[in-house]
Image: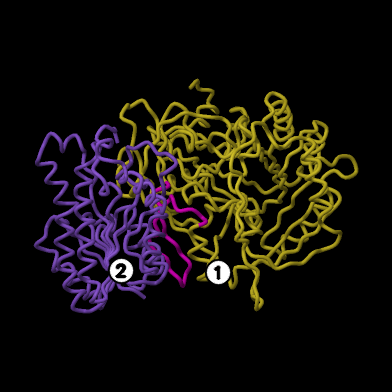
Amino acid sequence: MRKILIIGATSAIARATARRFAAAGDRLFLVARQAERLQAVADDASVRGAECVATAVMEALDDSRHAQIIEQAAEALDGLDTVLFAYGTLPDQSACEASFEQTRAAIEINLLSVISLLTILANRFESQGRGCIVVISSVAGDRGRQSNYVYGTAKGALTLFLQGLRNRLHRSGVRVITVKPGFVDTPMTASFKKGLLWVSPDTIARGILNAIDSGATVVYLPWFWRYIMLIIKAIPESLFRRLSL
Amino acid sequence: MTHRYTSWNRYPRATQRVRLQRWRFDSLPLPEEAHESALPFGNGRSYGDVCLNDGGSLIDARPLDRFIAFDQDSGLLRCEAGVLLDEILALTVPRGWFLPVTPGTRFVTVGGAIANDVHGKNHHRAGTFGCHVPAFELLRSDGSRRLCSPESHPEFYRATIGGLGLTGLITWAEIRLRRISTPLIETETQRYDTLDAFFELSAESDARFEQTVAWIDCLAGGARLGRGVFIRGNHAEISPSQPPRPSRRRVRIPVGPPFSAINPATLRLFNAAYFHGHPPGVQRDLVHYEPFFYPLDGVGDWNRIYGPRGFLQYQFVVPRTVGPDAVREILERIAQAGVGSFLAVLKVFGDPVSPGLLSFPLPGVTLALDFPNAGRKTFALLDQLDAVVRQAGGRIYPAKDARMCGEDFFARYPHWPRLDALRDPRFDSSFRRRMRGDLT
């Protein structure tokens, strides 16, 4: 039985993952912005077999509450050993190009608020000498592309931060897992035309559970994205700048 | 986008805009244009056009797939309407509870099961699915929400059970589950040679067995008319030390052939092989519930074998007194036409009455058939069968219909005007327009 905190618990990937945790009988502390949706997700997890489910409503940008929420989770679950970060927004790239305000908002939510929470959690897990931090980043952070480089910047910086954190926490026995999903059919991507590479949130959820169980550090989900991104990263910049990706 | 939104038999085809209902407390995602209608869509397992709204909108309710509450002691489950029966079984069977009524596929949503008031092999005992739904919430296009039950808004409760999605969107429902001791079914299978033998077996079995059904060889004519395999079963009380498990192997039809793989030659072969595959005498067996209730769910996308033109389902019920004669006449006509059905299922319905105004079952005999869509020839045969059903005072199952005439529908579903009066003004379906003779 794990004691799991999920931040962004009403997102599609979080919901699919919470179901799998619940079916395994884990204890869950769910955090999200909208109380009504949060309660619906909590009830579902409870029926599916979670040993206990508690919730808190939080705005991720409100970093003054971050320490308190983590404390509250540890109290409700009688300890904390796993944390899943599953929130984020997909900013409108062209709006960001026209406005620094939009760009800053995208980076604050997708990068800075996560770093704030990670800072508190890292210290807590370091002193307890164990724990597992799972953060959903993105393949978009592997290389800057004209179509979504603001989102890519946030995710790329997040990936780098996690890499450093992993290195730091290794000797304390704390694990840091960077999850890089490819195309996932969720409300965040509702307006996209779906092709063969698209997968369901549950496919990502299965990959996340496998990563937790297997000791992985950086996982691409599904696995083939590792090779797609290898190729994309290998294209020389002189050529890449001409592509419309 | 529209490709996924077909009915299971892939006939007729329809084009509609699709919007998702993501949370049960969200307002309905209605089309902006006031004249455009909407219709709830579940998992697309009904046949014909009850789940289609050609030229209008569909509200995909599958995202409403959350459980809300489950009382382990009483077996009362509350869940959102997009939950599949498959998901309920996965949750409750290990805890000793089973669906009170299940159709032949577990890939239908709870909302769809209510809207079509589906039935199963235990109709003679348990009635329809709607008999076990004590309450649900109905969301209408004016934003109103009604808790519907026999006591609260009883008129909406009765109109929505079997209401073909026309009264509004069911957001959540309660289902009273049935207690089981094991996931296993004790079955008895026996082949029989004549239609009379079927009715004898059925009369004898219905008192002792919760589940009864027969598969019939509808290409056998003359003295062998109505021959088939009778299957009956009960939930097993005791599990052996090594219980049978559901097959892990899942076959899937990856792409449809360019023409129907079901033709008179393959049908004759299959039907004879299936009949003779069962030795004479009673075969007793202990099986997992999956192959017993859902033999076709093991073959993913089996509807594709009928090719791009799809197929036609035909299910009717005729009153008990005239049942044997009407079924015989229909089997004779099918055998004569030589366009046999791959899956012919015969069952005697019982007396339980559904609260639904438009519920299909009547005390009597029901026969379900499916035919490859061979165009005019198939439609002409089905028109002939309609005449027999009409003569016998029977009726056709809307959830499986793509071509009955409105006159037959209105005559045999006398409560239709009461349902239509409670229809949501923004909701409509291809089926309703076809019955009314509206041009779309």
Magenta range? B62-86
Q: Residue B226 placed where, x, y %?
A: 82, 45
Q: Residues within 10 Å of mark 2 (few under 14, many from 20)?
A: many
Chain letter of the purple region: A
B28 or B124, which is in the foreground? B28
* Residue at 32% across, 45% down: A234
Question: Please, what is the three-letter code of the amino acid marked with disc 1?
Answer: Arg
Q: Is residue A47 magenta?
A: no
Identify the residue position indicated by label 2 in the image. Answer: A28
Q: Which mark is residue A106?
A: none
Same subunit: marks 2 and 1: no
* Residue at 56% across, 30% down: B12
Q: Is residue B70 magenta?
A: yes
Q: Residue B140 placed where, x, y %?
A: 35, 41
Chain letter of the yellow region: B
Q: Residue B393 placed where, x, y %?
A: 69, 37
The span from disc 2 to disc 1 (Cα, nearest Å) is: 29 Å
Please, which chain is the residue tagged with disc 2 on? A
The quarter of the picture where the N terminus of chain B appears is top left
**The quadrant where residue A49 appears:** bottom left
